Image: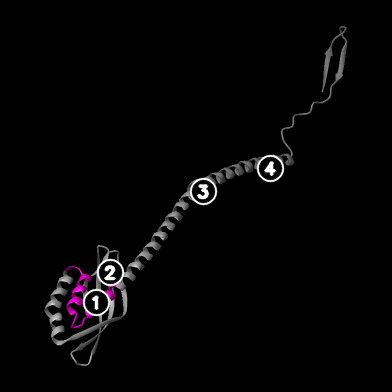
């Protein structure tokens, strides 16, 4: 391309050659496209990684401030329950042992007597009883047992080879008692009787007292 400049003296014409002007480049090379795409991908990856880190951070805070305290409370509750249960079991075992011992002693006292001391022995045994059973026992010994023991010279000796707790609470217990009773009337040979008795005990003023006595 050339331009014509007029100047100087009239009629002079100066021709000046100029270098061709390159057209602007509107497209990039494939390599540039790949680099641009990689850059965009990297940018997206950075954003995604940032979001992931933020999400992880939020979940970590949730675990620390919510899940762990709840778990700690649950473990404390379980530990408390197990401690209470263990104490309850020990207490129940203690009641069972006491009730078995008392039922054994009471059974022997109620079923053992001698003709010379029957009044004292059976009357003392009434202090081991309570309620309607105590009243019924007193009527029986006063009307039947004591007069018969004196008249026929009856001796009765009871032993308990075994006894077991059936159920027990703080204020009531049921005990199965296995009884051997040897009875001698006058000069006759002794006779042995084996029986099983279901003894119910009620706690009155911190004492286990017989409220039912049922042969089975």
Q: Nearer the viewer, mark 4 or mark 2?
A: 2
The quadrant of the image that shows the C terminus is: bottom left
State if disc 4 and disc 1 touch (CB < 8 Å): no
Q: Earlier in the sequence, mark 2 or mark 3?
A: 3
Please give the range of residues in magenta: 102-131
Q: Earlier in the sequence, mark 3 or mark 4?
A: 4
Which residue is disc 1 drawn over? 109
Task: Indicate the position of residue 13 as horizontal and vertical percent values.
Answer: 87, 13
Residue nearer the viewer, 142 or 103: 142
Q: Nearer the viewer, mark 1 or mark 4?
A: 1
125 is within the stretch colored magenta? yes
Residue at the spot 28% in from the left edge and 75% down from the top edge: 105
Q: Earlier in the sequence, mark 4 or mark 2?
A: 4
Residue nearer the viewer, 11 or 175: 175
Label 3 – label 1 distance at C-alpha: 67 Å
Local crowd size for mark 1, using a 10 Å CA cut-off: few (<14), some (14–19), many (≥20): some
State if disc 1 and disc 3 touch (CB < 8 Å): no
Label 2 – label 1 distance at C-alpha: 19 Å
Q: Report the side of 107 relative to 18 (left or right).
A: left
Q: Earlier in the sequence, mark 1 or mark 4?
A: 4
Which residue is disc 2 drawn over? 173
Residue at the spot 39% in from the left edge and 59% down from the top edge: 84
The quadrant of the image that shows the N terminus is: top right
Indicate which disc residue 63 carries.
3
Task: Indicate the position of residue 149 as horizontal and vertical percent values.
Answer: 16, 83
């Amino acid at each position: 391309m050339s331009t014509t400049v007029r100047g100087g003296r009239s009629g002079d014409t100066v021709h000046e050659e100029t270098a061709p002007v390159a057209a602007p480049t509107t497209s990039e090379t494939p390599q540039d496209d790949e680099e641009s795409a990689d850059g965009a991908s990297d940018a997206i990856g950075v954003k995604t990684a940032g979001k992931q880190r933020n999400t992880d951070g939020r979940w970590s805070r949730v675990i620390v401030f919510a899940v762990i305290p709840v778990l700690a409370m649950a473990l404390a509750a379980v530990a408390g329950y197990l401690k209470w249960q263990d104490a309850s079991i020990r207490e129940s075992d203690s009641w069972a042992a006491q009730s078995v011992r008392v039922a054994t002693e009471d059974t022997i006292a109620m079923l053992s007597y001698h003709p010379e001391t029957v009044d004292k022995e059976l009357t003392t045994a009434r202090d081991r009883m309570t309620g309607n059973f105590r009243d019924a026992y007193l009527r029986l010994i006063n009307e039947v047992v004591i007069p018969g023991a004196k008249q026929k010279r009856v001796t009765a000796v009871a032993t308990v080879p075994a006894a077991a707790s059936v159920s027990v609470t703080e204020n009531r217990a049921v005990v199965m008692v296995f009884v051997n009773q040897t009875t001698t009337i006058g000069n006759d040979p002794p006779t042995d009787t084996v029986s099983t008795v279901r003894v119910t005990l009620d706690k009155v003023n911190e004492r286990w007292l017989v409220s039912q006595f049922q042969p089975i």
